Image (cartoon, grey):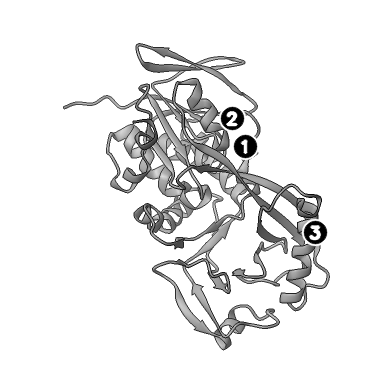
Amino acid sequence: MSRVAPQRIVVIGAGIVGASLAYHLAAKGAQVTVVEAGGIASGVTGTSFAWINTSCAGTDPIAALRGAAIAAWRRLEVQVPGLTVRWHGALSYGTQDGRVSPSCILIERARISQLEPHLRQPPQQAIHEPQQGALDAVAATHALLTAARALGATVRTHTPVLGFIVQDGRVTGVETATGVLEADVIVLAAGTGTAALAQKLGASLPIHASPAIFLRYQAPRGLVRGIISSHAMEVRQDEDGTLLAAEDYVDDAPENQPAAIAQRTASAIREELAGAEALAPAFACIGLRPMPFDGVPIIGYLPTVKGVYVCAMHPGVVLAAIVGQLASEEIVDGQPASALEACRTARFLA
């Protein structure tokens, strides 16, 4: 049966997931418009630790999707100018969260000291995952959107979505303050704002804003070579010396505000790493991650109205590359992806 590919696609959200979707859709010849209520990467993308890993604790309903994430990022590195991932590997020990990945290697103290020579007290053993890496999520988002623009895409920032035009059970346009954008398909990739957009279309998606603490420090260069995830800290370092750390959100008590946690985490890092005495907090905030109720990404068409595709997930940075690839194949080529079957919206809207 012949099928006409959608020509006009509006992607709502200019975080890293929306940017990946825009690039992949434009690469397939679609006429793509990205609409963003704020600035590029102004949501949770800008507060992401951005650790690209395939680890998962317990049974993983998206194992195939997660397992393809690293290869998808490696492909994008080749395709997209200015997109760089630092594949420096990760060390994990003492976390007791049960996370494992197919590439993990158990290493001893001597090797740990070689990989991270500034550790004051290297553990007897650690899990080493050499294929893992990290990126600057904001820079990657800009690189993807620049590549999408080169393929003809349009990006409209500071353009909130006010509503949708629906005719005969199908979305035909997106209402904004500057006018209506006609569309054959719209993609909801607005992070924690996705649920509210879906509600405007009569669909109730259980997505909550899951808080996490994101921290940046000024630090001497070369303090951390890869990613260290331990009972005491989760840290990595950019080439310019900026040290990034992630912490769990506790509550809104004064002693658990981001600035206070930044000071406590700094003390923990100084105890763990030789040479970290001059470590100084530079930035601390709460990032709100779009977390589906069951923890599984929500990806696919809404059954309640035609022409609406949803992409809401955590971890967004990890999955952005592979989801952009597979979702664009579903939207433009009409090729269902088996790796996305566990993610369908129908599990909530049946």
Q: Of all residues shown, which one is farthest toward the bottom?
A: 110
Residue depicted at x 50% and y 65%:
132
> Quick one: label 2, few (<14), some, or many (20+) residues within 10 Å?
many
Residue 198, percent across and down?
A: 48, 27
Whether the residues at callouts 1 and 2 have beta carbons within 8 Å, the answer is yes
Is 247 in front, or is 44? 247
Which mark, residue 281? 3
Is 289 in front, or is 150? 289
> Quick one: label 1, few (<14), some, or many (20+) residues within 10 Å?
many
In the rendered view of the protein, which quadrant contains the N terminus?
A: top left
Which mark, residue 36? 2
Sequence-first tag of 3 and 2: 2
Residue 140, percent across and down?
A: 57, 48
The kind of secondary structure element at disc 2 is loop
Which mark, residue 40? 1
The kind of secondary structure element at disc 3 is strand
Q: Of all residues shown, which one is farthest toward the top?
A: 167
In the rendered view of the protein, which quadrant contains the C terminus?
A: top left
Residue type highlighted by circle 3:
Pro
